[in-house]
Amino acid sequence: MNMRRTNWIRYSLAAAAAAAVLGMSGFRMLLHPVSPSPAAELEAQFVRQIGALSDLSTEMEALTASSTPNAATLAETRRLLIRMRMLYKTVEHLAAYLDGELVKDHINGAPLPKIERNMPSSLTVLPPAGLQALDDGLFGGDDPAQVHELHSTAVKFRIQTETWATHIRQRRALTDRMVLESLRAQVLRIFTLGLTGFDTPGSGNAIPEALVSLRSMREALAGYRSWLTPASEPAFVRSDSLLDAAVQYLEAHPDFGRLDRMRMLRTYVNPLYSSLLDLHLALRVELPHEVSPFPRALRYEARNLFGPDLLDPAYYARFPQSPRAPLQIELGRILFFDPVLSGNNERACASCHIPAKGFADGRAKSLALNFEGSLDRNAPTVLNSTYALRYFHDLRSEELGSQVEHVIVSEQEFNTTYWAIFDKLYASEEYVRLFREAFPEHGAKPINRHTLTVALSGYLQSLTGWNSPFDRYARGETREIDPAVVRGFNLFMGKAACGTCHFAPVFNGTVPPDYEDSESEVLGVPAQPVWANAEIDPDLGRYANRRASEHAPFNQHAFKTPTVRNIALTAPYMHNGVYQTLEEVMQFYNVGGGAGIGIELPNQTLPPDPLGLSRREIRDIIAFMEALTDTAGLTRAPARLPAYPEGSPLNGRTAGGVY
């Protein structure tokens, strides 16, 4: 279970009970006097298809059992896997919606070891499993021996699918709301995970699988034809037509490397995502927030993958929205630029997160307090940083607000205590007034750890930019953009495989389509910018983040996948600033990461194969990333800082700090 949601369980059960008693009064309900709900037939079909997948998994187990496979065995096993994957794709929208954690961990998750999510106090490693692991293994080379090497993976998959099939036969819970939600989620999944190649790491079978999925979605949608009214028919016809048109487009453009994903986005993905919402509303089916108190990262009523309303910043910050949020954000902005928070009154948050540098610091490694050396890493941008479940380069923090404490107590950063900060803030009548106005519920003691954290977090939460030249073009608000940007986007999301780690739309490691998990990667970042016989940077990253449940060998040298939004402003690059330019970064990826420059790292998650990008293709990808720049309205510093009594040395402090 997602630990973020555990606090809502008791309330959820109460809400469900109340809904049953009240007969769901006040909710939209699917109204039709004659036909039974299409969800019932879809559920029966879903049960049959999972049963069929279970049967095929038994065949896969038998094929991989041979200790002496040959070329014919390899070919047969590959054909069987493709059948299995295609069958799974017919039900993926429902499978991933109903059993998301099972699918990610055992059915079709990334082919990498994972930490058991439901045992946070201990370290339990799950080996690579599921269809992606089989795809990566069977298509990762032509040695027949790899068939037998995948036998244990096939056995585990058979066990999981058998258990899954048994479970869903006993469950009768599918509703029309779930069907419609799952279809919209699948639109995002196909574009962000399917057509990027994330889902087919070995076979590269992305477009055929997307076609199967789109056709299955259309079949599911067809079940609602008998429910149509004059009000709902236009949205149904538009959704059906868009699905058909998307299928025709992919059929006409089967080359993965040449697929125009920008056209796919503007012509099919965004319009379909919007029209399915229109259909959901027109059918008068209850919306997610009307039946569940669970907070969600994805705002269901958003209509565009690159719309500013797609993701909810408050979900990630974990602070409830307040009517006084504007006052709290403004107070947080003042605090962010005020060096009074540091022990020497000379360093502010903005000292290391400099607005002109994209809220990074422009250093390979950040400067320590009082110029006493450097930190181990540089300061990442805080622009759009709210869209993550984990923070810092090593993912040690689960809350945006907890970053404050790390910085305050660090001897190399602020080197102070909350109590010392409170004493200084209370000494300013202006600060006391600002805190009282922002947090009147705290009465005579408005300055405390909670209010300080909420104010700073609120400001960080507000630093979101969705109005870059790329965003406006992707939303269809502008008709023209540099063709190099379009070519670069298509490469980023396709041949170059950047979008398999930097997921759209934030282009960071927050995983679609739910956007409720943050990933790290092991790239093999070198200690020095050399291109042969390189040595790995000694920083162990996530492995050494002091979280016992993540002290797994595969986390050595793992770092958070940052956003590439505003990347043109945030040089140098990587956690250690080893690369000064985007051209160097692209060269690193183009040769296969650390493996391509002589670093032997058994747990590198970046595919070691060279990308084969030409100089022009690299320039195009950089042009796309540069088109993601948007700091408009976000860089304003306070005109002045709150005053102290006359004669106080604190009155001479500089907004943004001295260094």
Image (tube, rainbow, N blue to C red):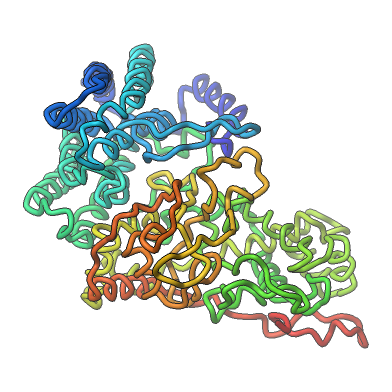
Residue at 16 percent of width and 26 percent of height: 73
Tell whether 558 sits left or right of 105: right
Tell whether 256 sits left or right of 622: left
Which is more toward the observer, 470 or 458? 470
Residue at 61 percent of width and 66 percent of height: 377
Which is more toward the observer, 204 or 264? 204
Residue at 54 percent of width and 34 percent of height: 117
Image location (x, y in percent) of residue 98:
38, 29
Q: Residue furthest left?
A: 252
Q: Is residue 49 visible?
A: no
Report which quarter residue 189 is drawn in. top left
Report which quarter residue 128 is drawn in. top left
Image location (x, y in percent) of residue 454:
69, 58
Tell whether 570 sits left or right of 87: right
Q: Is residue 241 visible?
A: yes
In this rendering, the answer to whether 524 lies above or below 359 is above
In this rendering, the answer to whether 305 lies above or below 291 is below
